[in-house]
Image (tube, grey):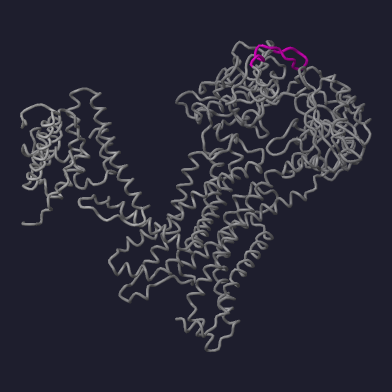
Amino acid sequence: MTLDATLYAVLLRAVPDLGPYRADAVETYLDLRAEAAGRGWRALVGLFLRSAGLALGALLVAVWRAIRRVVTPSPRPPRRGHREPFEMFSHLVHDLRLALRSLRQRPGFSFAIVAMLALGIGSTTAVFSVVDQVLIQALPYEEPDRLVYFDEGSHPGPLVRMWREQLDSFETVAVAWDDQTRDLTGDGPPMQLTTVGVTADFLPLFEASAIHGRLLGPNDRTADRVAVLDAGLWQRRWGSDPSVVGSTVTLDGEPWTIVGVMSPTFVSPEAVVDRGVDLWVPIDADHEWLEEWGMQILSVVGRLAPGVERSTAQAELDTLAAQVATEQPIRVLENGEPRRTTIVDLHAATTEEASRPLLLLLGAVGLMLLIGCANVANLMLARGQERRQELALRSALGAGRGRLVGQLLTDALALSITGGLLGIGVAFAGIRIFESVRPSELPRLTDLTIDPRALGFALAVSLITGLLSGLAPAFRATRIRATRGLRTATGPGYGPRSLGGFLVVAEVAMALILLIGAGLFGHNLLKLLTTDPGFSPDGVVRVQVSLGEDFDRSGRVPFARRVLEEIEAIPGVESTAAGWTVPFDFTGGSRCCWRTGFRTAPDAGQIASFVHPVTPDYFATLGIPRRGRDLSWNDTGTEPIPAILNVAMAEALFGDQDPVGQPVRLGQNEPHQLVVVGVVEDTHHYGLDRDIGEAVYVPYAAFGGGIGPLSIVVRFASAFTPTSADALRQAVWAVDPHLPVAEIATLPRMISRSLGEPRFLSMLFGVFALLAALLAASGIASSLLYAVGRRRREMGIRMAVGARQSDLLALVVRQGMMLTGLGLLIGLVGSALLGRFLESLIYGLSPTDPTTFAVVTAALATVAFGASYWPARIAARTDPAITLRAE
Amino acid sequence: MPDDRPAPPTAPLKPRDFLILLALAGGERHGYGLIQDIRELSDDRVHMDPANLYRALRRMVRDGLVLDSGRRAGDGGAERRVYRLSDAGRQTAADEAQRLERLTVAARARRLITGPGVTT
């Protein structure tokens, strides 16, 4: 059959009243089609549209009639010759009306369920939205699966040149020189612009376009001094004035031409260049640093040639790496292997770090939803028990079990879809909350919204939730043995082997898993907050400046010294110093800047370490305990150059021996001879959650001029106020009025910011876990309450024959705690097994940390005890006389 | 046999139903044939689509106005379901045709249309 005929046949399924003639209708359509074919394709199209259109119209009329039947309070009297409704519709319609009516009859019940489901479905949808937009959705570029990132961070110029020239597996190999700054002066306060130098083929890979002017082209050289402006900066600084294109601005003291403005819809590739790029310029291909095999500077991204697999490209890269290793000893690793570069799918590179915490969150909120479902199922079980007479009656009157199950399922679905609709509102609110608490490191979240995919997800979750909550109770409730009379429909019990008991056990287990997860994150956060950073952050402020390109090596050191002298003169300043980086300048994934090997003798083994050029008083300003002498401005490079080691490095190089006075060689290519003059305590330079690692401090006077960025630390005797911040800026400008002063931050604030992700995870997990615990507790309470209600007669008898109140109490509590105990056991095992997923996110804490496990389990057990105690008290208050009379 | 047929409806037949009955009055038809016939009878103004045709047919079969003659090989060779008029259907169609004729006569009498008719 042809496509249109098949389509027509499918459409006809939805048209009511056709009955057995549906096949004939399709045949007639085929006949008409044969005729129309003779008249040309226009006739064919016309036939299809007309036929399909009329079929759809018939369907809509039938649906409209069905809706009216639902909404109308009483059925209209049948007219002679009226159409009978579409069979399946009539059942559904009937069940829906019953469902809505029974919901209205029990408003408390319905409200509780709808509220629980709204909360669960809404939170799950909100988290899903985030996961979808960050992890799942493809990158917004053309053919994103052919884009790959050259991993291991930055690469040396000569190697990158080889790649661009020799690699056949790639259609494009594009390069970016990230991490640059240019100082913008004139027309306003001096500003430091984040600049990226790129090859001409870089921006087109990411579908960049200019809304004014043009992008960089293959003929643009650095010497031409052309630049493309970011849309955000254009709006902020130039008020979106298009005349900025073609105009000249002063960057680093020199005139540059703005040739274009980037479109605001451009999504910068976050795995390759940092966020917040202000300026795109042609890459400085002739820079001396790009001739060095030892300088890792460039970020590389490529597009695979059509049809080429990543594995093929990787193989080509590895062959090249082996070839290079024979010519460049610096490209050989310690173990003799050539230094390889891995190519990674760009999407994976962008999302990798965020994937674990986000997926964990999704799992957590999913567990919470499951607990909610279990609660709802429990409530529906109880409700089914209440309706057993009604159900038995209907069964006796001939309703098949399928019909009854269908009706109860419709009840559950009506609740879950209502919950889902309200949940969408919750999801919107959840998104707002998420926006305000999320850590800044999350990639790709420009505007977080609830989009149609999320809505579809919410709908699907609502349906599944309804099925999950409703199916088992529906089957349970309709297990009627009508032969034993209408009064003896079987119902759910709450022993460990019953459905109700199973649900409670499951709830407790899942709640425990969530609580332990939250407990671990919380414990981790606590540990981090109480970790000694290795210095005294209180009262210390950090100022960043960049001594850019118009300073040369020899100019930077005297400049830094003068700035520090100006700062020292500010009243209230106890001491000040500077370095390339200070602690907590770089946290999270990144570390900067100079890392090389150290050895004690030419033939000794080398230890790799970060090197920190620092000025005198660095350790005093930061409050790092020091032994030996400090570095000074006079240490300008005459070898042996004084150096200070931290304890870790001292132990690594010299063991128990006193390192002071010992020689050390720095670097491989042109080794410098150093001598150890002091030892300092270890500090957490790159974050509280990173290993301390070895460090070597060298004099700024000798090595500091090598790069531009300077991090100045200032210890204030009194409180730090905006006035003090101004004074700092003025001190810098006193030396050079055109130097932009970037962020001024207090060190405690920087430390706090570095804890953004652990704090975020603890908070969200904590919220979900708490809600889960509440749900589980209410589940225990409601099921026990219900069981107590069912066993009233038994309770009454027991009391009548002499049982004491405390016996009844114990009876109920024991039942509750038995279920809880089983649940806790399963939860403990589950937590132990799932713990490994948390490993990378908790630092220094075992995922099976006994303290956390013990504390959380005890807490949940207590809550469960309370939840059991309350129904028990109600049971104990039964007056046997009343109970027995009522039966 | 006797009174298990529904009484003929006193309200006028829907035009669609009348056209179908009228077409069937010309003999047995299958679906496609009915559509063609109806096109002709209505001066190419009514193009019925299969869905509506068969819904109407199903209803009329249920009401006893049309009979399902089973599947028969048509002139194209393919088998198609064929319908014919029942006695009740024939009667109903005839009643309707007469009702329409009375209307036509009245229209002529009021000079709405010209043609053979009673002149006063």
The answer to whether residue A605 is seen in the rendering is no
Magenta stretch in the rendered image: A242-256
- Tell me, yes or no, if residue A612 can be seen here: yes
Residue A864: horizontal and vertical position, in percent?
Answer: 60, 67
Query: Residue A526, percent across and down?
Result: 73, 52
Q: Quadrant of the N terminus of chain B?
A: bottom left
- For image coordinates 28% across by 36% down, the residue present is A7
A137 in relation to A804, above or below: above
Compared with A432, A771 (above or below) is: below
Query: Farthest front residue?
Result: B120
Measured from the top left, where is residue A222 in percent x and y? 68, 13
Residue A54 rendering spot, x and y as whole percentages: 27, 36
Q: Can residue A252 be found in the magenta stretch? A: yes
Above or below for A423 versus B80: below
Left or right of residue A283, residue A724 in this image: right
Rendering quarter of residue A220: top right
Of A631 and A862, the residue lying toward us? A862
In this image, B107 relative to A708: left or right? left
* Quadrant of the rendering where the C terminus of chain B is positioned: top left
**Residue closer to the observer: A554 or A777:** A777
User: Magenta includes A179?
Assistant: no
Q: Nearer the viewer, residue A335 or A176?
A: A176
Residue under the image location 52 percent in, 68 percent down: A783
